[in-house]
Amino acid sequence: MGCGIFGAINYENQPVFPFVYWGLRSQNHRGHQSHGFLTYSNNHFYVYKNLDLVPKIKTNVIHEWFERLPGSIGIGNVRYTTSGKCDDNSLISGTQPVTAQSDGIKLALSFNGNIVNTSPLKREMTQNFEDFLYTCDSDIICHKMLLGLKQTKDLVSAARGVMENLDGAFSVTGITGNGEFFAFKDQYGIKPLCAGHDPATKTFAFSSETVSLDMNSFVKDFELNPGELVTVSKDGFKRIQVIENPKHAFCAFEYAYFARPDSTFGGKYVYEIREDFGRNIVKEYPKESHDADIIMSVPETGDDSAMGVHEQSGLRWERASRRHRYVTERAFILLNNERFSTIDKKINILGNKVAGKRVIITEDSIVRGDTTKVIIDKLRKAGATKVYVFVTFPRIIGPCFYGIDMSTYGQLVGSKRTPQEIAKVIGADGVCYQSIENLVRAIGRKEDDLCMACITGKYPTPCAQKMADIMKQRFLEGYEEKTRVYELDEVQPLTADGKAN
């Protein structure tokens, strides 16, 4: 599931809720459907969950929140679902953080990612916990971790059991019933997770993105390594490499779309990388760049690449596309009957700025093509004579199994179409994708250290690769995909090593 996670512990016995609250507010772009807070005090978990965005808190009710969520340890989550149903009852049931307890052992956790081999894990949890109820993948992780704690009484061993047996992506922060505060990442390190602290208040935190550390005036200390468990004491962080894995696979889509531009990965601001993306496309497509009068962006994730296109090409960046700030739904995670009407209301085109102009629009990615198609149609109606689309993320050809809700081949406009065919579908004069080579170069990581499964078809985890191969063949044979691939039991009898049971 697409999520933002944040957790913090304070060693001066101050309420931790304000830190967690602002940590989630600054990551609300990572999940709009629901939010949740959990704090720990005197061996008890206090939980608040609700739908939609993290709420504004008025001054006159702050005391109510402190009473509702006491304690000096806390974790939180903002979520959009990539597993399970999307009705309100299902969404609130699947809202994180989640808790589990058995034989006097308690556990709470928040996670970002997606589990691929859910069916065998559901069976295992059902066999070991009479009250196990699956609402989302976090239930599986929490109970698998709890099972490890019951069997070994050791946090490191329990985390190792999760890493070795779950196929997928998971960055986790959690609290045990004894008040141990910890975080860990899957052995491929697919989803982001960093750590930081505030020496003035003796507060230590984990966050999906560095922007949440910035929001709380914390110092960033490090990004967690793949397969690493980190615990916290008043002396600071203790880092334990639980599993050594030479194959790293950090999600490349974070750089193009998901992360906030003012966050950093590997010491580089995301917005700087996106500007490089724009420069790269101009170099790759000089003909289209010369055949344009102005640049526009699809706000807001297209803005930074537009600056790069502007600087490299010398064309004017005309700010003639404006986003309605309070229409927050992401187009590619909406139902089909909601998508077009929302897109139409989400982006406003300043018509007289584009009339008679040849236009380049910068787009972070094209998933279904709906957003881009609506915007191009608006530009045509406003009088644009040509429209070229410069896309920073290479053509998406396969589903994501790791926490981005593009989970079937059929919904992807690029799964069977060339860029020229995509241009016809969306009404553009040309679709110009950044190459994979230039994407990797701008990011600054080795190609082998990135997960680019959705653009290469090469999945880092074995179960995901197996499912992708099965479903691609079925799709090419005309099979109708009615649900997410990893939720189909018929392709689920797989173990964590990718072998059929």
Image (cartoon, rainbow, N blue to C red):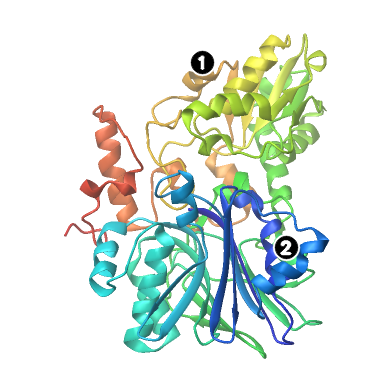
Which corner quadrant of the image does residue 137 belong to? bottom left
Tell which circle, 2 or 1, labels the residue nearer the N-terminal end: 2
Task: Please state which amino acid type lies under the numbered disc 1.
Answer: Lys
Q: Is residue 496 visible?
A: no
- For the residue pair 27 and 193, the one nearer the viewer reads as 27
Image-quadrant location for residue 309: top right
Taking the image as shown, residue 194 lies to the left or right of residue 457, namely right
- Left or right: residue 487 compared with residue 25: left
Residue 22's disc is: 2
Q: Residue at x 56, y 24 (%)?
A: 340
Residue under pointer 1: 424
Classify mark 1: residues with Cα within 10 Å, few (<14), some (14-19) or many (20+).
Answer: few
User: In the current view of this chain or complex, which residue is farthest to the left?
Assistant: 501
In the image, residue 413 above or below residue 55: above
Please say whether residue 98 is visible from this viewpoint: yes
Q: Which sits in the foreground, 58 or 433?
A: 58
Residue at 37%, 72% (x, y): give it. 143
Q: Is residue 70 left or right of residue 147?
A: right
Disc 2 and disc 1: Cα gap in Å?
44 Å
